[in-house]
Amino acid sequence: MCNNIYKPELMEVTEIIDETVDTKTFRLKLKDEEVAKNFSFKAGQFGEYGVFGEGESTFCIASSPTRSDYIECSFKHVGKVTTALRRLSVGDTIGFRGPYGNYFPVEEMKGKNVLFIAGGIGLAPVRCVIWNTLDLRDQFKDITIVYGARSVQDLVYKRELEEWKSMKDIKTVVTVDPGGETPDWKDEIGFVPAIVEKISPKSENTVAIVCGPPIMIKFTIPVLLKLGFSEDNIITTLENRMKCGLGKCGRCNVGNVYVCKDGPVFTYTQLKELPQEY
Amino acid sequence: MEKIISYENLTKLVDGIIQSGHIAIGQDEKGINWKRLNDAKELKINYASVPSNLSYKEFLFTKTEPVFYFRNNKDNFNLIEPKPEINENSKIVFLGAKPCDSRSIEIMSKVFNWDYKDKFFNQRAVQSIVIGTACNYQDEFCFCTSVGLSPVSEKGSDIFLVPLDDKNFAVKIISEKGKEFIAPYLNLLADENISLDKIIVGIKAPEKKFDTAKVKEWVTNNFEHKIFDDAGATCLSCGQCAFACPVCHCFDIVDEECDYTCGRRMKNWDACQFGLFTLHGSGHNPRETHGKRYRQRVAHKFKYYHDKFDEILCTGCGRCSRGCPAGIDIACVVTNINTVANQA
């Protein structure tokens, strides 16, 4: 009749990186070459990653669509599936369904400045867009990255933070919450909203992409509005518990919006229209 | 001139259905649930008694079913499609569906075909034939007229029966599917000179309790109103309302392992009133209180589904309220909303 929408594709874990004590990044390759040839996604989309016998979990695709022969996902071990994922080694097989959901308006961002703001594991979806823009560097104007975590130990993608800091044509600011620094910490100390205010990026012709814990987003948006960002140019993502990712199982909705199909990417204008149920 | 069928001939029809390898689904003896009839003698058309505790939803959207099997033989992973339990050439014939049941396939089809198509539901929906019946029962929980239906609504039926007396039904052929299906059994029908319209007009309908458009508008603008907390305050989170509902379709996806090398992924009924339904891995829960979960129930039925699919996700059967151990009556809650909306 038609395809089984619940049946995943098989992927092989080809690389595992320990980001923090409880967070890992997997690099994954589709096992079926035909499927791999036709596979594509856009920055911001997500997938259902499954360990057979344990279940599925929802994460964004953390790698850039410009690097298309693999995908990466980063996850913190908190529940049954993520604990099972954590136990896997290179060469193991997982299930993947996706890509699902909408995406960041990377095409519309061309010719503009881009300000990336991320907190904690919220850097995963942002990292996808960062590499997407960096791989097409000449099509974007100024690129600024502000990333913060609770402590130095909680920073993810550390090697890439160093790489971004060393790049001459982008500005990268890394911060940790007060008290989270180590004695040899040379970067910023302070909460993300305060750091954004301190560096006060220009809002003219700039799109801000903001992902992180709800509390960070809550206090960062007023700062951006104060700096003159329009509500349409502040873009974030919503995360809700999902099972199907296909707009059917009924749990990820915020009001009449299904995060899995109408999201996960929303502008602040859209976010303001939603009831406070996320 | 109308077509009529006697109860005896209806039994013969069911016999024919079973003999030709189709699946006849009817109510069980006690009128609690629906079951596959093995013998035409088991047929019961409960047009004048309370709707069964459960609808026949489970024959379309099953309580639990495998979406695939997996096998792991020395790093060689295999995903295996489940075989359909029912032969694809067989019809699934629902016998004696009241208007509040017969609508369910059309309503649920919307969500199962929104962009991604759920082949498990669709396959059964394509195979189904709904023989509906006019309803001669009503109690304080019935509210089909408030959601655009009525005891004589033919919507969703392929063939519609109107009880004439204890022994005879008038037969209306509604859809092409119905016409094709009944063709081999036309000899069981008789012509009778009756005025069906008059009989239909004579069937009493429950009073209309609320206006869905008004309710929808109010829910849109009063998301934080305490009416939802009040309504959900006594909820026990048992999920009866969702399981009994002919159109509630939320589900869970869960793996079952038989050993380390094989197992299956299951799609199971779930319910929005369960506390774990929306619980995040972080511990955050967007709908952590009964009030928020009850609001979801009301809003999904009367607003969200209508926004998305132009359908009210409710047929007014009253099962959720009749069976609620905490006595929560959705029609009462929604009527209250209508009253509050009128006062505003």
Image (cartoon, coloured by chain):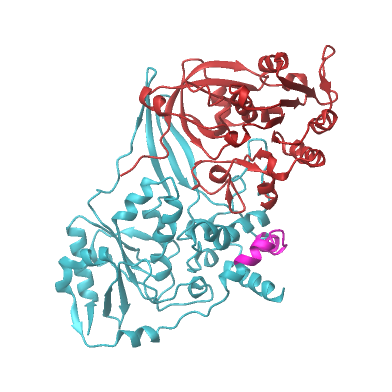
The vertical placement of A111 against B146, above or below, is above
Measured as percent of width and height from the top left, residue B14 is found at 22, 65
Q: Is residue A62 visible?
A: yes
At a point 66% along the width and 17% down the height, the residue shown is A160
Image quarter where the N terminus of chain A lies is top left
At a point 72% along the width and 62% down the height, the residue shown is B225
Q: Is residue B219 magenta?
A: yes
Looking at the image, which is closer to me, B25 or A244?
Answer: A244
In the rendered structure, the colour chosen for chain A is: red
Q: Residue furthest top?
A: A184
Looking at the rendering, the stretch of residues picked out in magenta corresponds to B216-232
The vertical placement of A232 against A84, above or below, is below
In the rendered structure, the colour chosen for chain B is: cyan
Q: Main secondary structure of the magenta part?
A: helix
Classify residue B175 as left or right of residue B153.
left
Q: Quadrant of residue A213?
A: top right
Measured as percent of width and height from the top left, residue B58 is found at 40, 54
Looking at the image, which is closer to me, B334 or A246?
Answer: A246
Measured as percent of width and height from the top left, residue B339 is found at 66, 75
